[in-house]
Image (tube, coloured by chain):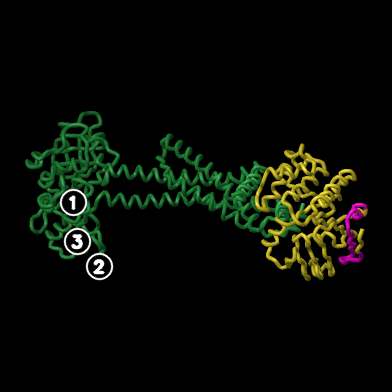
Chain colours: A yellow, B green
Amino acid sequence: MIALEGITKAYKMGKRDLVVLKGINLQVKQGELVAIMGASGSGKSTLLNIAGCLDRPTTGKYYFEDREVSRLKSGDLARIRGQRIGFIFQTFNLLSRITALANVELGMTYAGGVNRQRAKEALVKVGLSERIHHRPLELSGGEQQRVAIARAIVKNPSLFLADEPTGQLDSSSGEEVISILLSLHAEQGTTLIIVTHDASVAHRCQRIIHLKDGQIVAEENV
Amino acid sequence: MKKLMGLLGSVWGGVITHKLRSFLTMLGIVVGVAAVIILMAVGKGSTQSIVSRFSSLGANTLTVSPGSTQQQGGIRTAFGSASTLTLEDAEAIAASVSNITAVAPSSSTQVQAIVGINNVRATVTGVTPEYEQVNSLQMAEGDFISADDNDSKARVVVIGTNVETTLFPDSDPVGQTIRAGNYIVTVIGVLQSSSQSSFGSVNNAIFIPLNTLQLLGGQQLTKNGDHVVSSIGVEITDTKYVTTVTNDITTLLLDRHQILDSANADFSVTSVEALLSSITSVTNQLTLLLGAIAAISLLVGGIGVMNIMLVSVLERTREIGIRKALGAKESDIWAQFLIEAAFLTFTGGIIGVIIGWGGAYIINRMGTYATLVTPNIIILAVSVSVGIGLFFGFYPAWNASRLEPIKALRSE
């Protein structure tokens, strides 16, 4: 599915380079459910951004579906993001001025076209059939995150990336979100990578990657 | 198609979320477009009214004047001061040029006209009966000079309204006498007041039979005894003959004056049409100038659009990041913001057209200025305002499209 070979990432911070990733080698197979754990600043999010084609590695090679994509033009990366990858962010990243339904449709805008029926079905699937015309600010955190999940699944991506999806939620709505994500994997065999602080979430995955100071320090199979 | 609808949806969303801001952005364009339309309409309207006034003077008349219109070596004789045109030239034109209805030679001199204690310095113009027709004069009272008056060298005059009010403040002038220079003449008619005249106002004129003027000593003779006149008016049967008749008269007079090269002509033939075309070109320039001044406010409006779009991009950085994360390409973001700018200015342009059109209509009704709104002005104003949107939206849109998705997502 994806393979990272010797990925590094450095940011310019004034005159010094801040090295966030120091040579990551990682493979994730089709249909795998992987958790990435690590302290703040260990490079989890950066790794996920590179895996999601939102960012390019400084050095190293990234194969997405057997295609080396780290040097592609921004337009080609955008096409991969639009059609193959579904993101779920800690901060939801919904557009606050439009309804839940419109947010889900926004996910389809750049992935081949809007289909209102499918957008509604996606919202039903995450249990928001009563809420499709509400705006994000009229929804609870858990509901907003479920809109974000609907926005990701509506375009049937081959890879789901969730960056601390429960980080801003209370435990019960967090549990709802996690169980939706896990059931997606169980029912449809979607490839899913979850970045999380929460060990109990990580232990419900198939494999846990431990990251420290930009390096993979341990891998465990659950 | 679906993509376009999505794009328009995004644009509409962006506009409608910030109603007041969108409106204020448009306002600059609205004012600019309205100003352009109103000023251009005033310019066009003035042109049209000037043209119609001059046309009423008679687009089908030609004037032959002495002196050349072309600069030659040495000092040029003052226009109209040369004594190269004669009564005999006028008779020759009447006899041998076709497509003309009347030929009116005339000659002027300045005299002091006195009635009792009232007196006025006036131009006495010696004319033939045809002068009335060629210059579209209207009588208020009495008759114009007749052929008999001219043949018999009758001591009669026709006066303009200003001369009437000065010399005869309290009485009816017809039948009364005026002392003009050393001679006594009788008033036989008064002209209607006229606001239009190409050569001095007829209101200040005194007309006398041409032969009488010669008799009274106001007219010179040339070396070979011909009678000098100061101008010859020619009325043509139809304006389409202006060029032909001009050429015929030129050929005839060059021949009569024994001049081989038309560049050395000692006379000139001018038409109201020629005058009109130069006036029109001047007023068109003025109209353009007015439009250009108004266009400055349109430009300022455009800068306002750019300013707002830059703010809008900054404010929506996170939205741009979200869209990019969802697969929006640079071109998608670019198109979204560019269309948003063009949409604002287009809408502003349409509103400006409506206001400008209404304003031009009101100004017309108030009567100070004639206004004329032509379709060209409207098409120009709307396309320029869309162009301004595209031009001033280009940089902000480009800025937006170049944002890095990660950085954009992190911004608050």
- The answer for which chain carries disc 1 is B
Q: Amino acid at mark 1?
A: Ser
Q: Which residue is mark 1?
A: B230
Q: Nearer the viewer, residue B135 or B168?
A: B135
Secondary element type, mark 3: loop
Give the Cα distance between marks 3 and 2: 13 Å
In the visual, does A104 lie left or right of B185?
right
Q: Amino acid at mark 3?
A: Ala
- The answer for which chain carries disc 2 is B
Residue drawn where x is 48% and y is 47% of the image: B36
Residue drawn where x is 85% and y is 69% of the image: A22
Secondary element type, mark 2: loop
Give the Cα distance between marks 1 and 2: 24 Å
Q: Which mark is first along the chain, 2 or 3?
A: 2
Q: Which residue is mark 3?
A: B265
Residue A132 is inside the magenta segment? no
Query: Image quarter for residue A70?
Result: bottom right
Q: Is residue B304 visible?
A: no
Q: Which mark is first along the chain, 2 or 1?
A: 2
Give the Cα distance between marks 3 and 1: 16 Å
